[in-house]
Amino acid sequence: MKPWNDWKFVIVATLILGLAPFVPEPHLFGKIRWVAGGAIGMQLLDWFDLVWHGLPWLLLLRLIVLKLFTLLKPA
């Protein structure tokens, strides 16, 4: 089984990497606010950081959508 299809791996990655650093706020939330504010002054490293911290969340969303489609799929 590939790690991006494993629920345990994706949830742990989301909790650890997706929310790190935890104090004073998760890094991803600050980056999303920065992009929502126009991304003024963001450099390439900031975009990479946004993708790096956001990837576990995207993998989790992907697993949820796939699970919903399999549940709603007619037999």
Image (cartoon, rainbow, N blue to C red):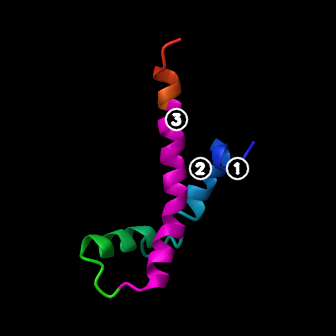
Depth order, front residue of 7/74: 74
Discs 2, 3 touching: Cβ within 8 Å: no
The kind of secondary structure the magenta stretch mainly shows is helix
Magenta span = 42-67
Residue denoted by label 2: 11
Depth order, front residue of 5/7: 5
Residue type at tag 3: Leu
Residues under labels 3 and 1: Cα distance?
15 Å
Magenta stretch: residue 55 in it? yes
Query: Is 29 left or right of 9, judged from the image as shown?
Result: left
Q: Secondary structure at mark 2?
A: helix
Residue denoted by label 1: 3
Q: Earlier in the sequence, mark 1 or mark 2?
A: 1
Residue at 61 percent of width and 50 percent of height = 10
Residue type at tag 2: Ile
Residue denoted by label 3: 66
Q: Percent position (x, y) of residue 44?
A: 46, 83
**Quadrant (top left/top right/bottom left/bottom right) for the N terminus:** top right
Residue at 70 percent of width and 50 percent of height = 3
Q: Earlier in the sequence, mark 2 or mark 3?
A: 2
Magenta stretch: residue 61 in it? yes
Q: Percent position (x, y) of residue 12?
A: 63, 54
Q: Secondary structure at mark 3?
A: helix
Residue type at tag 1: Pro
**Structural crowding at the residue carrying mark 2, measured as other residues with C-alpha within 10 Å and reported as few (<14), some (14–19) or many (≥20):** some
Q: Percent position (x, y) of residue 63?
A: 54, 41
**Structural crowding at the residue carrying mark 3, measured as other residues with C-alpha within 10 Å and reported as few (<14), some (14–19) or many (≥20):** few
Name the quadrant containing residue 8.
top right
Residue 75 visible within the image? yes
Q: Secondary structure at mark 1?
A: helix
User: Which circle, 2 or 3, is nearer the viewer?
Assistant: 3
